[in-house]
Image (cartoon, rainbow, N blue to C red):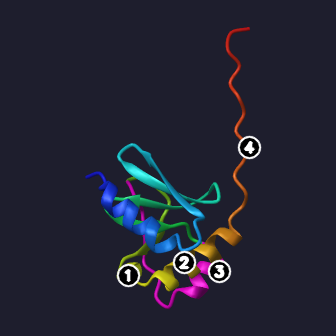
Amino acid sequence: MASTPQFAEFVVEQINSSDHVTAKKMFGEYTLYWDGKPFALVCDNKLYIKPTIAGRAFLSEVTEAAPYPGAKPSFLIEEQLEDREWLTNLARLTVAELPEPKPRTKKQHGA
C-alpha cells in the first residue's frame, strides 16, 4: 500500500519547523530530506528514521522495522508523530550524524 500525500505532508510539517525538510515521492512512497540529506522514509503511512547512535540514545524505547521487504531496519516512529518538538529534535540529531550524500555523477551520453 502506497503512502498518501496527506500523510507525507503531515510528517514534513511536523518536522519542518525551520523549513529544512522536503519530501520526494519515489515508487509510491516518500524519502524525506533535511537540506538535501536523506534521513527518513514514509512507507505505508508510517515514518521510518535512519538509525544512528545519537537517535538510539534519544529514543527511550527503540522499535526497529524494515520500511519495505529487503530494506535495512530503521527506527519506526508511531506514538510521537504528534510531538513536533520531539520529532524535530530526533531528526536534527539523526541528520547531524549521517554522512553527506555522495555527489551525483552526470551520465555520459554516447561517445
Relative vertical location of residue 92 with respect to residue 57 in this rendering, above or below: above
Camera-side mark, 4 or 2: 2
Relative vertical location of residue 109 with respect to residue 64 in this rendering, above or below: above
* Residue pointed to by mark 3: 54
Of 9 and 96, the residue lying toward us:
9
Tags 1 and 3 touching, CB below 8 Å: no
| Numbered label attached to residue 82 | 1
* Residue pointed to by mark 4: 103
Tags 4 and 2 touching, CB below 8 Å: no
* x then y, percent, for residue 43: 37, 58
64 part of magenta stretch: yes
Amino acid type at image mark 1: Glu
Camera-side mark, 1 or 3: 1
* x then y, percent, for residue 99: 72, 61
Could you tell me which secondary element the residue under label 1 belongs to? helix
* Residue pointed to by mark 2: 88
94 part of magenta stretch: no
Could you tell me which secondary element the residue under label 3 belongs to? helix
Q: Give the range drawn in magenta.
A: 52-68
